[in-house]
Image (cartoon, rainbow, N blue to C red):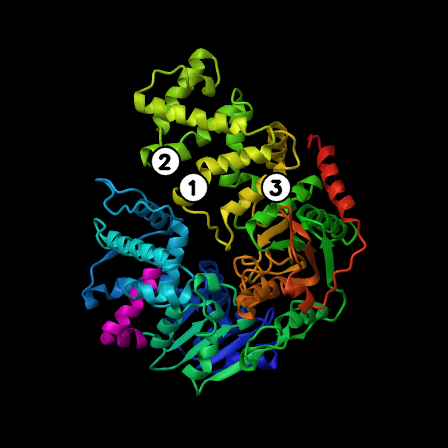
Amino acid sequence: MDGLNAQQRQAVMHQNGPCLVLAGAGSGKTRVLTMRAARLIAEGVRPERILMFTFTRKAAEEMRKRLGSLAGEERAESVWIGTFHSVCLRILKMSLRDAGWSDFDILTEHKAIRLARDILAPPDEDNPYGMSWSADPKILLARISRAKADLADVSRGERHLRENTELDDFNIEQTLEFWRRYEDAKQNAVPKRLLDFDDLLLHTYRMFVEHPNILRHWQNRWDYILEDEVQDTNIAQHEICRMLAAEHRNYFCVGDVQQSIYGFRGSRPDRTVMSFERDYPEGTIIKLPVNYRSDARIVELGARLIRHGSIPALYSLIQTPHRPAETEPVFDVASDEDDEAERIARTILQYKYDGGMSWQDMAVLYRVNAQSRAIEDAMVRHDIPYVVHGSCGFYDRKEVRDVTAFLQLAHNPHSDQGDEALERVINIPTGWFIKHTGKSTHFLGQAFLRDLRATAARHGCSMWKALSLGNWKQWQWDSIYDFVDFVDAVRRSGPAPNTMIAAVREKGYDEWLMREEGGVEDDDDGTRFENLDQLAYVAQHFENAGALLDFVTMQRSRSGRTQEGADVVHLLTLHRAKGLEWPAVFVCGLSLGLLPHRRSVKYYDPDTRRHIIPESIEEERRLCYVGVTRAMRFVHLSYLRRYQGYELAPSPFVKEMGFDLETTDNEEQAKQEAWRQIEDGGVQNG
């Protein structure tokens, strides 16, 4: 225990009874959690009598590895360490017989989306659950997930939707009908009923409530329960933890309300962390206030920001820095996303070549994945190696590849690139096809494509030309005519590539993406539509589709694809940055609508968009705080005046951190310089 400060030592030495450890950014919380478990084992507690909850599988693996180095690998293997979902799965499987419940299989996220898509489609003899509703399956599944996180099943779904969403009566009724069909389809699945990931929590809770003998068995199974990242748990997880600890009350949890950023996934710090005093009046609260990660001025910057939140004093932290004050946080004003990216790239080059830093010492953080486009363009422009975490590069994202494939066919289908594009998108339905057939796809299949390739080879022509030369069946001709008409309509909408992109989207692609391709939501509270908006914005800089396609091809060939651990700059969303750190961090897009994100901001007067409701941006402020506190030595923050051509006001967080908006830069000159460098790279732009 050498090197622990007084508060860390107090937490590690805590023996029995409930204890909440409030651990700020860079305060060594993981070390404290694993050292306490190791100390218990060293003092005679059997490892199998300890249960440790983590937020992610990766965190569970890291926790077991650390515990193994302290207590021995064999002992660490005996400790129950896992996510709530994995632990509940084990509990359910081991208790089914005692509860008299039937066995089940897991419905994975991918299969859940496929099932939801079938339910939304028109009904037929193979799909009795179809309801003919054009809605995003991911959004509907997210609504159900949020309800289950609050321990609401379908029988209590209406009340939950009315109290926790802004849906009108029609959408509430439709969502409930979808939910009923979804549960029926899972219950009647063959050969076993299906449970999705949220069911693992809900059914474990139900089993404990309905079968007290089973609950007592599991209460007696463990003497100590330790929980990491408690601020990110939902009500269902918290109740399961509370029930398991109800007898021995040796519940030890670690977290920080100031870093609670998963409300969109159901986390409720007001009902978990901040209910500790009510749930455990005899409990101990220990605060870890020392930040060992960041420069003193970065710690001060984060403190200025987070103090504008509404966290009660009992659960808030005033951090003290361990590192001295050596650098000043930098705030920059950019004209738009390309100007912002150019400034970031130039600063990265300075840190690399003048400051002697490695590429991997630097990270660029943004609110939604679509923002990576401008950053990636700048990285390629300056030959800076990079990797995008949690997503492929912007121009490799599925929706971007699909739309540029349609542009390729409209521009030049008689080429190798045209053949590749045709194979990619020929089975994507158009609005005309859906409207006139009622079907959601005109799938021609792989056998058709093999015949088409053979026809093209036989005639020595492109696959596009071969469409008119094959000996096809009538239903295939119907799909071919529909597909060709669609591409012709896109071609006629040109030559400006941004109008061609709009034509692709308006004539059916957006609808297909929303309903058939798993929805438009991404994993970081953004949407795939935002990626397409960003592509259309880029397209405005090019006078024809050929110039845009040449640029996209160049970006794909030079984009960051690298192995983990390579010396590259890290690009990732703020959500994915949680728990990580770098010597230099760039936080992008401190603009109202980006950070805080437009879907989070609520106004007292929605018509004039005046006077933000403070509660609506609480989590966005915490997200910004997480970004700032990832930095060890240098932090750069930037506000952009325009995004995708729209004027944006500065984020309220800018003022809260104490920055002013005065700048002497010639914004238009900086913007033109950014695009001039693209032109120098051999690409003709508009």
Residue behind mark 1: 511
Question: Of the residues under marks 3 and 1, which one precedes in the sequence?
Answer: 1
Crowd rating for badge 3 (residues with CA inside 10 Å; few <14, some 14–19, many 20+): some
Work out whether residue 342 can be spotted.
yes
Q: Is residue 524 left or right of residue 151?
A: right
Look at the image and say whether residue 198 sits in the magenta stretch. yes
Q: Determine whether the residue tagged by mark 1 lies in a helix, strand or loop.
A: helix
Vertical arrangement, residue 285 with respect to residue 579, above or below: below
Task: Return the residue found at the far left.
Answer: 100
Question: Of the residues under marks 2 and 1, which one precedes in the sequence?
Answer: 2
CA separation in Å, label 2 and label 1: 10 Å
The residue that appears at 29% across and 47% down in the rendered structure is 131
Question: Of the residues under marks 3 and 2, which one precedes in the sequence?
Answer: 2
Residue 668 picture location, percent across and down: 76, 45
- Main SS class of the magenta portion in the image: helix
Vertical arrangement, residue 588 with respect to residue 508, above or below: below
What's under tag 2, amino acid-wise? Ile
Would you say the residues marked 3 and 2 are in contact, meaning their CB atoms lie under 8 Å apart?
no
Residue 257 picture location, percent across and down: 53, 72
Residue 29 picture location, percent across and down: 54, 71
Task: Return the residue found at the far top.
Answer: 459
Would you say the residues marked 2 and 1 are in contact, meaning their CB atoms lie under 8 Å apart?
yes
Residue behind mark 2: 434
Bounds of the magenta span?
Answer: 196-220
Report which quarter residue 660 is drawn in. Answer: bottom right
Q: Is residue 509 left or right of residue 23?
A: left
Work out whether residue 393 can be spotted.
no
Pick whichever, 85 or 236, lies toward us: 236
Q: Is residue 324 left or right of residue 225?
A: right
Residue behind mark 3: 537
Residue 466 picture location, percent across and down: 43, 17
